[in-house]
Image (cartoon, helix red, strand yellow):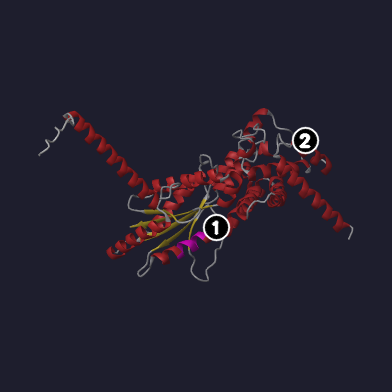
Amino acid sequence: MRVPRAADTTPVPPAWDKRALRGELATKDAAIAALRRDLDELATRDPCTRLYHHGPFRRAAAAELERAAAAGRPVSLVMVDIDGFRVLNQRRGPEAADAALASVALRLRRLTRATDVLGRTGADELAVLMPGTTLTGAQACCERLIAELEAGDLPQAGFVTVSAGVAAYEPSTTLDDLVVDAAAGLERARALGGARASVRLEDGAQDANPAHTAVVEALAGALNERDRYTGEHSESVVELARTVAVSLGLDTTQIEQVAMAAVLHDIGKVAVPDRILHKPAALDAEEWLLMREHPVIGERILRAIPGMGAVARIVRHEHERYDGRGYPDGLAGRDIPIGSRIILACDAYSAMTTDRPYRAAMSRRAALEELYRCAGTQFDPRVTEALVGSLFWQAREDRAAATG
């Protein structure tokens, strides 16, 4: 006996329900596609800098190098490294280090073209392959990046400088050859004090002017001719500043920058009128306003020299007080460059213990008491402790030498 089938009572969805279902499916498909793009991005791009990871960078760079070589076009490779990155990471934390990397990468993207290949190839190292760009053009790009960074602080990271190595393609050059040559240029830039772009030297060649020695000596000589007291005073500050920088654990590059800034911290006084510079009495209010301009003038002089931005910044702020009541910008505490804080204390001690036309020199004991009294207001307490410690050991060695 045949059993009749029950009638299908499933309701037929109206047309608007089908449209809604199709829309929902389309939304889900779009979300899945976006998720796939995000996963692909994570696989090929560094999330901090938005540049290629090392592997994808090498693949893309090798392909561009092959195309440019086949077309007979020039190609250059730039490697950029943040100066003092390890110290930045230690002292300000990984967030500041990441912020520095992200800011440098952003500026590098703005200075390069869509056809250039950018990647993060190390902890603090960025690389750019530039098809169609000569060595001179790549160096100019690096100089623009260095100048931009020297113009001011980066958000969350403070003042940051970079060194760069540049290499150019020659017939039969491989990507590995370019990397080796650019890395050698980068090491040379670091050895010269950082904050500059350099190329690999030919075997046996030597740098004639490491760390701007000739420039510093010329400016110091000009200052000494302009005002012998100021020149001699600057010389007395240098060794104190260098010793304090070492005792505070600054790295080699920072120590040399502090030393150069100590030599040149009064270079802006070359623009101060003689009637003020050589006045045998205390300055009046109007004269004092003119004298207060010398750190800004000094910064301007030094910024005109490529690669001296870090030193120029120290010179600008060497009269800032720890409590924020200094000049020219009223910076306070750790916002003042450490080199400026060191020079301020060393400069003050040297001035206090030197005869001036309008007052006699203080005794060492009185000068040390003044340093302690002003620690935390005018001077950084850590710098004060390091300076007093250095002076104590220096006095002890002097006594030992005097007694045979």
Q: Is 101 rendered above or below residue 289?
A: below
Q: Amino acid at mark 2?
A: Arg
Looking at the image, the residue that sits furthest to the left is 1
- Say which residue label 2 marks: 373
Is 184 a magenta residue? yes
Q: Is residue 3 visible?
A: yes
Secondary structure at numbered mark 2: helix
The residue sitting at 64% across, 35% down in the picture is: 291
- 158 or 368, nearer to the observer: 158
Mark drawn on residue 190: 1
Q: Give the quadrant of the C terminus.
A: bottom right
Residue 237 rendering spot, x and y as whole percentages:
71, 48
Residue 225 rendering spot, x and y as whole percentages:
66, 49
Q: Amino acid at mark 1?
A: Arg
The residue sitting at 65% across, 49% down in the picture is: 263
Residue 287 falls in image quadrant: top right
Secondary structure at numbered mark 1: helix
Q: Give the quadrant of the N terminus.
A: top left
**Other residues around mark 1 within 10 Å, as few (<14) / some (14–19) / many (≥20):** many
Left/right placement of residue 275 relative to residue 174 reads: right
